[in-house]
Amino acid sequence: MLAAERRKKIIDLVHQDKRVLVSDLSRMFEVTEETIRRDLEKLEKDGIVSRTYGGAMLNRHTNEDLPFLTRGALNTDIKRNIAIKALNLINDGDTLMVDPSSTSFEFLKLLGNKSNLTIITNSINILHEFANSSLSIISTGGSLRHRSLSLVGPVAHDTTQRYNVDIAVISCKGIDMDRGVTDSNEPECELKKYMLRQAEKIVLLADHTKFNKTAFANLVELSRLDVLITDRKPTDTWLKLLAENNVEVLY
């Protein structure tokens, strides 16, 4: 197993269990404890974990605003399954606003069978990866956030307001019964608000780990969502609340 692949699996484990032990990882991956320590040192430098005696724990201070490349490596199967469920909502000729989240990126990967789609996005990664695709892509422009590979600020706001689209596809960092949908950083959150204002329909992609969590910045009330797509059936309490707010739930 390559070191990068091993570290990706360690990231998955630490997000799942919140804490990992060097001895357990050494046995699991059949490598020396020194090799695991080097892996954890690299992940600590990336801001993903904090090393502890005998292991490491999730770095909660940066967990909600991880670099895009790190987020993209997490729970890819879950993100892909959510993205698949979103495909039936998209018709040929649709116009979409798409945020720079790793889940939205997985969603765009699956749109190959759709034709004449226009995507408006502030994601540098989408602009790069889909440069030669059949998608018609419009960049918002703006100031670059290196950490998330996204464009934000007044220029991005102005561009977004020029267009009216069929669907806005977004993700989030938390969804709470009282506080609604929240995100981890204010500049991206503000641009997403502009995207939502310009869209006829709002589709939120949120895996089960986002439920009952609140992040730093308020994004949108539950009542403004049209469709919520997740990977597991929400609790009966959540389903009742979403139904009361006329939110269609797909899982």
Image (cartoon, rainbow, N blue to C red):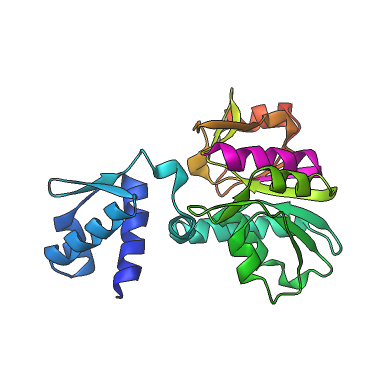
What is the quadrant of residue 63 in the picture?
top left
Viewer-proximal residue among 45 and 102: 45
As drawn, 219 above or below 40: above
Q: Residue at x 50, y 61 (%)?
A: 77
Q: In this orientation, does residue 251 appear? A: no
Q: Is residue 206 magenta?
A: no
The part of the image, by quadrant, that contains residue 94 is bottom right
Q: Residue at x 14, y 57 (%)?
A: 23
Q: Which of the two residues, 61 or 3, is positioned nearer the viewer here?
A: 61
Image location of residue 33, percent across then percent down = 13, 63
Q: Position of residue 245 (x, y in %)?
A: 73, 28
Q: Quadrant of residue 10?
A: bottom left
Q: Tell me the residue at 76%/74% (across/down).
A: 134
How many labels, in total?
Answer: 0
Q: Position of residue 57 (x, y in %)?
A: 26, 45
Q: In the rendered image, which quarter contains the N terminus?
A: bottom left
In the shown orientation, is residue 221 left or right of residue 47? right
The residue segment tinted magenta is: 185-204
Q: Who is closer to the viewer here, 157 or 104?
A: 157
Q: Residue at x 45, y 53 (%)?
A: 67
> Is residue 68 something that shows in the picture?
yes
Q: Position of residue 192 (x, y in %)?
A: 67, 42
On screen, residue 220 versus residue 70, left or right, reads right
Magenta: main secondary structure equals helix
Residue furthest top in the image: 178
**Residue 192 lies in the magenta-colored region:** yes
Task: Examine the rendered structure and indicate whether residue 115 appears above or below residue 90.
Answer: below
